[in-house]
Image: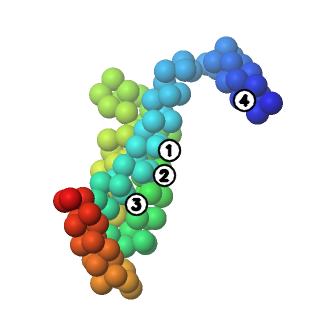
Amino acid sequence: MFIAIVGIASTLVAIYSSESVFWITVYASAGLAATFAPVLIVSLYWDKLTNQGAVAGMFAGFITVVLWDTFVPDIYFIMTEALPAMLVSFIVIIVVSKLTEQPEIEQVRKELAQAKKVWKK
């Protein structure tokens, strides 16, 4: 039932929407990329990432996509919302992580060291 409802709803949006499905997909992809990609990349390469930094970066990326689309909508021929939103997200992640502390940082370092041993085998 749910799949049928979503299928019908997406067909109606595609038929009656003033925007093309392509640009709706680009907008959704920009939102997902700006929300999750910077946190994932930073978490893989920087062990000083804090929970607060990750959450703040996710919110900053999402909000930047929405604001960029609202206030600067006419530059699709140059870039989508993803690039500025990801840059803002990276900056917010690093700044907030530097201003906050991860209480279990030693435990995180031990787990990372164990994970490295497993992957080297």
Mark 1 vs mark 4: which is more N-terminal?
4
Which corner quadrant holds the C terminus?
bottom left
Q: Which residue is mark 3?
A: 57
Query: Is the residue under label 1 in contact with that under label 3 (CB below 8 Å)?
Result: no
Q: Which mark is residue 66?
A: 1
Mark seen at residue 3: 4
Q: Residues within 10 Å of mark 3 (few under 14, many from 20)?
A: many
C-alpha separation, residue under disc 4 versus residue under disc 3? 33 Å
Label 4 secondary element:
helix
Quadrant of the snapshot with the N terminus: top right
Of the two numbered discs 2 and 3 in the rendering, the one whose residue sits closer to the viewer:
3
Residue indicated by mark 2: 63
Residue 68 placement, left or right of 49: right
Q: Nearer the viewer, residue 72 or 32?
A: 32
Where is residue 23 drawn, in percent x and y?
Answer: 49, 24
Q: Which secondary structure lies at badge 3?
A: helix
Label 3 vs label 1, nearer the camera: 3
| Tag 1: amino acid | Val
Separation (CA) of disc 1 from disc 4? 28 Å
- Is label 2 in contact with label 1 (beta carbons under 8 Å)? yes
